Image (tube, rainbow, N blue to C red):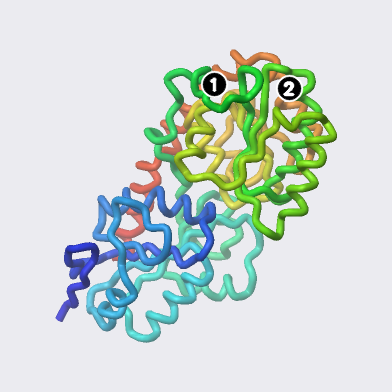
Amino acid sequence: MEFSVPIAGKTAGKLQLIITNLHWRYSGVTATNRMVAPKLASMIEAAWLGSDIPTGISRLSVGGLLKLWMRRTPIIWHARRNNEMIAGVFLRALGWPLKLLFTSAAQRHHSWITRWLIRRMDAIIATSDASASYLKREATVVTHGVDTDRYAPPADRAAAFAEAKLPGRYVIGCFGRVRAQKGTDLFVDAMCKLLPQHPDFSAVIVGAITPDQTGFANELRRKIAEAGLQDRIVITGELPIAEVESWYRRLTIYAFTSRNEGFGLTLIEAMSVGAVLVATRAGAAEIVVEDGVTGTLVPTGDAKALADAIEPLMRDPEAARAMGMRGRQRVLDRFSLDAEARNIAAVYRRLI
């Protein structure tokens, strides 16, 4: 017989999908997972297992999961981390009727344990061709998408900027955890060089500073103070998502400075609000940014190249605005959340 699992006030005897988020810290993986999950739940009977559940999808408790043991019809277990793959392999070995799916964004050679786990998945999704090339097995490429209604250009960007109470008329941003891997130091170096020449601009760094990166962040603050730019380069620390979205809408230019990245969701979030991108060739930058059309691509780890690419846009904010609006259209055409959900759902259908 089929078990009926209570999920948020309804039964899920026909549950087809478990979206896992078995991680203690909110991360880019969590963010991408949360955005697409409600869309998927509108297409297939789905439940969320873990922390940071978004609205629009039901929660599966541990007790509910236990009741699925020995069910006859298969359920997709969608993992995005090693620990989630390990849990899926373990549960299936004990009798849970799981079809195992892993989404990989990494653009590097995997550890032996990750390779071992990947071989045990029933299907693999890669977020880019580059990510797929490291998997050593067949994968379906599904790029991330963004909610283009939530990340939309402001009706009045000047008014949105004024809310920040920053000097000048325009702001350039760099979002993500404050650390060397994200290239936050490259952004600070570029801003220390450029802002004295462009008094109409201020800069903002939006992202968490974890305890192990306190020294790195303090060194950035020292550089900013030495340049006399404390009032024009703001480091916000971690913010609620609504405040992050507000900062996006204030941007004229977005600097994606990562030295290495899986995908880089901030690329399409910033592009969706109409900010022009200057992006290092990391993550998905080369498939997202049309060099010279919707932004500019620069080598990774090169603060001078970053500054040289940003400076013409600071000199001509109207040209930056036009490029930003072309970027918005590119997101609408190729990187919407609806398109991501449809493509993932197609993989689910093949599995069940």
Q: Name the outermost residue toward the bottom.
A: 94
C-alpha distance separating marks 1 and 2: 22 Å
Q: Nearer the viewer, residue 72 or 197?
A: 197
Give the residue type at disc 1. Ala
Residue 352 locus on image (x, y percent): 28, 65
- Identity of the residue drawn at 28% across and 82% down: 69
Q: Is residue 42 visible to the viewer in this orientation of the structure?
A: yes
**Mark 2 packing: few (<14 Cα in 10 Å), some, or many (20+)?**
some
Query: Which residue in the protein does label 1 denote?
Result: 162
Quadrant hosting residue 72? bottom left
Query: Which residue in the protein does label 2 denote?
Result: 311
The disc placed on residue 9 is none
Residue 288 locus on image (x, y percent): 55, 37
Q: Say whether marks 1 and 2 touch (CB < 8 Å).
A: no
Q: Nearer the viewer, residue 167 or 89?
A: 167
The secondary structure type at the circle numbered 1 is: helix
- Identity of the residue drawn at 61% across and 60% down: 134
Quadrant the N terminus occupies: bottom left
Residue 309 locus on image (x, y percent): 72, 27
- Identity of the residue drawn at 54% across and 49% down: 128
- Identity of the residue drawn at 62% across and 25% down: 166
Location of residue 231 with respect to 36 vertically, above or below: above
Say whether disc 1 or disc 2 marks the residue closer to the N-terminus: 1
Location of residue 272 with respect to 159 vertically, above or below: below
Location of residue 73 with respect to 269 vertically, above or below: below
**Mark 1 packing: few (<14 Cα in 10 Å), some, or many (20+)?**
some
